[in-house]
Amino acid sequence: MDSGKSGDATAVTIPETKDKGKGKAVTWAAPPSVYSVSTKAEPSPRPGWKKGVAITDFVLRLGAIGAAMASAVTMGNNEEMLPFFTQFLQFHAQWNEFPMFQFFVVANGVISGYMILALPFSYVCIVRPHAVGPRLSLMILDIVMMGVVTGGASSAAAIVYLFHNGSQDANWIAICQGFSNFCKAASQAVVTSFVAAVFLMCLVSLSALALIRN
Amino acid sequence: MDSGKSGDATAVTIPETKDKGKGKAVTWAAPPSVYSVSTKAEPSPRPGWKKGVAITDFVLRLGAIGAAMASAVTMGNNEEMLPFFTQFLQFHAQWNEFPMFQFFVVANGVISGYMILALPFSYVCIVRPHAVGPRLSLMILDIVMMGVVTGGASSAAAIVYLFHNGSQDANWIAICQGFSNFCKAASQAVVTSFVAAVFLMCLVSLSALALIRN
């Protein structure tokens, strides 16, 4: 009788706690999964470490946004017209007359946009440091974006080098003596874009670390 | 009788709580899957899949060696001298007079050497598909090498573009009318190098897949 009553009592209390709020459903689901983790990987693999990686990931992403956006804006506003001209030459240099600079601006703009869109997913990785799905998809997109930004920065760097030094072999003259501000802005944009590329490289390496099963 | 009744009562209450909200169905479904995971994890989850990834990794590495070596050799032997000259111009084009092509050849040579050195480690990953150490170190080096080869290929591509089209803005004339063979070889080398970059991109993504804890 007593045991039956106590059994009844528990049967009542459990639904009560369940019914208190919808949040309970989550808490109710949590304990078994916690046990399963502890049995699966016995010493509960340093969740704080993974969280630290996820937070670093978020911060690096902010840095990459800043760098990519700065380089896109710097290059996108890059234009110089010299105050003199001859009959044949109009001394005017603009970024969008060089296809590599167009690619550069587009690439850095795309990276900025992607990075902003990726921030929520990065936040999910902070909240759930063990989630594999968002981290893996972010990582593979990061790899592609790393290729894009490195390509854009390198091709722009090649052109900026020619601006500075020209090429004797191809009879291309350096134009930086004339367009010094144009050259300076282009160089700054290239350097900033390489900084974004390094940020992305760190991001991919960090994601690789976070994906290790431990 | 009483105890039987109380048992009946609990049997009723539990389904009731399940039916109350759709969230309950999830909570109820969780425990069995958790147990299945914990039992699944023990007997080394799908080793064949990981082995397949490791073998693909090895094959991709061979492809990357071929592509990088081919582009380094093509560019490294790229030279053309036209059979006529004027008083002022000697029509001679050689790869090592362009610093971007020098970087290109060095980058592709380094990639080839690294890939050859990495083959034994890739083989270790085939033999031990669950080893994390060699895979992670290979992956991080692959990321760096991907950056290097993408940078080299992109800067060379920018120069090859200028060879073909010149730049009105900077008063650089296209030189491909004259040096057609030089241009053709340079373009081939650039394309092959981009193939190597794509191989490396696939390698990094594959390593990411292989690193997932399962």
Image: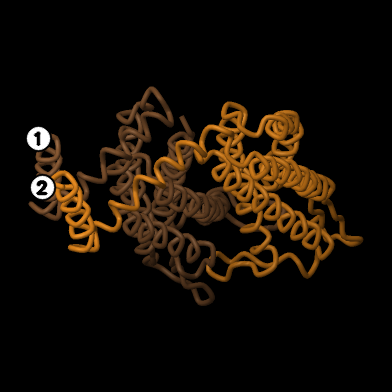
Chain colours: A brown, B orange
Q: Position of residue A70 (x, y in %)?
A: 33, 53
What is the spatial separation of the Cα atoms under label 2 and label 1, in whole angstroms?
Answer: 15 Å
Please report contact status of discs 2 and 1: CB closer than 8 Å, yes or no: no
Residue A12's tag is: 2
Q: Are marks 2 and 1 on the same chain?
A: yes
Observer-side mark, 2 or 1, equals 1
For the view shown, which residue lies furthest in the bottom direction? A87
Q: Where A70 sits versus B50, above or below?
A: below
Front one among A122 and A161 = A122
Residue A2's tag is: 1
The crowd level at tag 2 (other Cα within 10 Å; few <14, some 14-19, many 20+) is: some
Front one among B41 and B153 = B41
Q: Where B184 sits versus A29, above or below?
A: below
Q: Position of residue A106 (x, y in %)?
A: 44, 65
Disc 1 marks which amino acid? Answer: Asp
Left/right of residue B139 with respect to residue A124 in the rendered view:
right
Left/right of residue B179 with respect to residue A112 in the rendered view:
right
Mark closest to the chain's N terminus, 2 or 1: 1
Disc 2 marks which amino acid? Answer: Val
Q: Residue at x 44, y 40 (%)?
A: A207
Query: Which SS class for mark 1?
Result: helix
Q: Position of residue B77 (x, y in %)?
A: 84, 47
Task: Check the residue under mark 2 and report the chain it is in.
Answer: A
Question: Which quadrant holds residue A198?
Answer: top left
Front one among A102 and A147 = A147
For the view shown, which residue lies furthest in the right direction? B83
